Amino acid sequence: MSAGADSIYLDHAATAPLAPGVADVMQRVLVDTPANPASAHGPGRAAATEVDTAAQALGGLINAPPGSLVWTSGATESINLALKGGAEFAGCGAHIVSVATEHRATLDALAWLEKQGACITRLGVDGDGRIDMDALSDAVDADTTLVSVMHVNNETGVVQDIAAIGALCAERGVALHVDAAQSLGRLTIDVGAMNIALLSVSAHKIGGPKGVGALYVRQRPRVGLAPGIHGGGQQKGLRSGTLATHQIAGFGAAARHVVAHRDAEQQRLAALRERLWQRIGATDGALRNGASDSVAAPFLSVSVSGVHGDALLTGLTEGEPALAVASGAACSAAKGQSSYVLRAMGRSPREAGASIRFSLGAGNDADDVDRAAERFVAEVARLRALSPAA
Amino acid sequence: MNVLDDGHTARRWLPRFLSPRHAVVNYAIMRWQGIGDADTPGADAECRLHIACDGLCEQVPIAAAAFAAFGPPVVIACADWACEWLEQRTIGDAHGLSVAHFEQALALAPSERYAALLVLDALAGALENSRLDQDRPYLGS
């Protein structure tokens, strides 16, 4: 998608534009189905039907029964409910195993739980961003109450082997929570076959609206969760509050769109991603983060030497054409505030600081990719020419 | 200020970062009388300032000033602004350049003051260097 005459949108991992038809569905539900879906009367039942339809669509995308979904405000809330709700249900003996490269929603929730007395084990990753299954096996012990792993990393696109992790967790009798914010709609997810007990997703990553997400909660064997929000007892008491019917309907419409287009679209994006890397990979000092065969199709994370990360990101996002891209962190590398994900993969602080994430999506084509590559190469050259090291 | 921002300013200096006019790479001058370096490891930034002038006394005008810099965009912008300010001013004026001048011209946020200090450190080095090197004229276009 070109976000404007002089802008190219390459930040679909942050938010994808609305998928075709989603806005129409939301408008229709907002106007024509105004009642509270928890109400027992006819208009209320009509609103509840819209919620059920969305649940069937989303459930179909992850092979989950509709009654197993808890609607939330997004993946961050879902993750908080899964981790904090699970730990509270487990009591004072909670032990959670997770990974150092998780999203901040997970890391910060775990840090909070640690202060409350939970025991947290954080696994490292290898140079390609993958966790070591032997290390995971060693970390899971008889006291472990939950394993929490993200399916696709939000900075690098690195894919963890959730099927293998799920099998290990099932064998050891431990519940698995998966942060699927970046994998929903991009990879196949089957909560049953993958032995996933809890799964967090967001609508706006797949072309749905912002402000709505879901937490899949396995029913059999049942996963214990304490409520995240108390109130009217909606959603089996786990997350009280009136459901945002039009938001949920929009999520469902986006899920239906994904089901119809995912496989062909991900192949197309993978080809575009390789085209982009072919054009910028020849830049002296450019490094690709994550092996191409273990990175989700839309993602390309590149570190480059000899330029300052903040300068590179600003130059790309504010120059012409402007590239809507992201960095692991725009902070000073020397302050140790560069991407913790890339540093965990072995990049130096300065390399991790000068890193750009391209995430492609439905509106991008070869012309976008070629222009973006040309801009990237030119900006790196410009900044290097300004440097005292030139 | 945008409600989603945490101290992000208007970045009045942004055009200077995007299109600096005083990068040393763009100057054909073969011999600079004063070159000063400074760095700020905490911000992962470096600045090199070049000045060309004929003579040493306080009234001598600076014929040309240029920079090379590595660091956050505000560092490049401050270096570029300083060079523009210095050209055609005197050595005496240059000694009077302060952080306040940068703040006023570029609307620096408090968290960006370090960039002005970095450039001033580099300028001090360049002025000292030119004092030691003042007997050699510059060759410029």
Image (cartoon, rainbow, N blue to C red):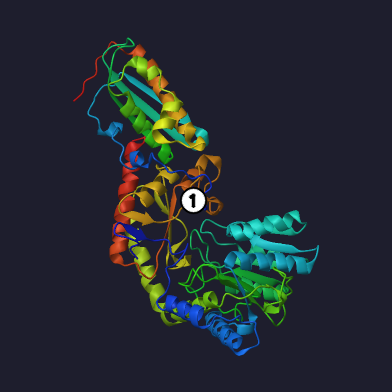
Direction from residue A207 to residue A241 in the image, left or right: right
Examine the image and state in which quarter residue A382 appears.
top left
Q: Looking at the rendering, in which quadrant would you find the C terminus of chain B? A: top left
Q: Is residue B133 visible?
A: yes
For the residue marked with disc 1, what is the amino acid?
Answer: Asn
Q: Residues within 10 Å of mark 1 (few under 14, many from 20)?
A: few
Query: Measuring 60% from the left and 88% from the top, which residue is drawn there?
Result: A45
Instruction: Estimate the x, y position of residue B85 in percent, counting from the top left.
Output: 33, 26
Pointer 1 indicates a residue of which chain?
Answer: B
Examine the image and state in which quarter residue A163 appears.
bottom right
Q: Is residue A388 visible?
A: no
- The secondary element bearing badge 1 is classed as loop
- Relative to A83, say whether B17 is above or below: above
> According to the image, label 1 marks what residue?
B2
Which of these two is toward me, A120 or A13?
A13
Direction from residue A140 to residue A273 in the image, left or right: left
- Relative to A15, say whether A266 is above or below: below
Q: Residue furthest right?
A: A92
Query: Measuring 59% from the left and 82% from the top, which residue is drawn there?
Result: A64
Query: Measuring 30% from the left and 20% from the top, which residue is drawn there?
Result: B89
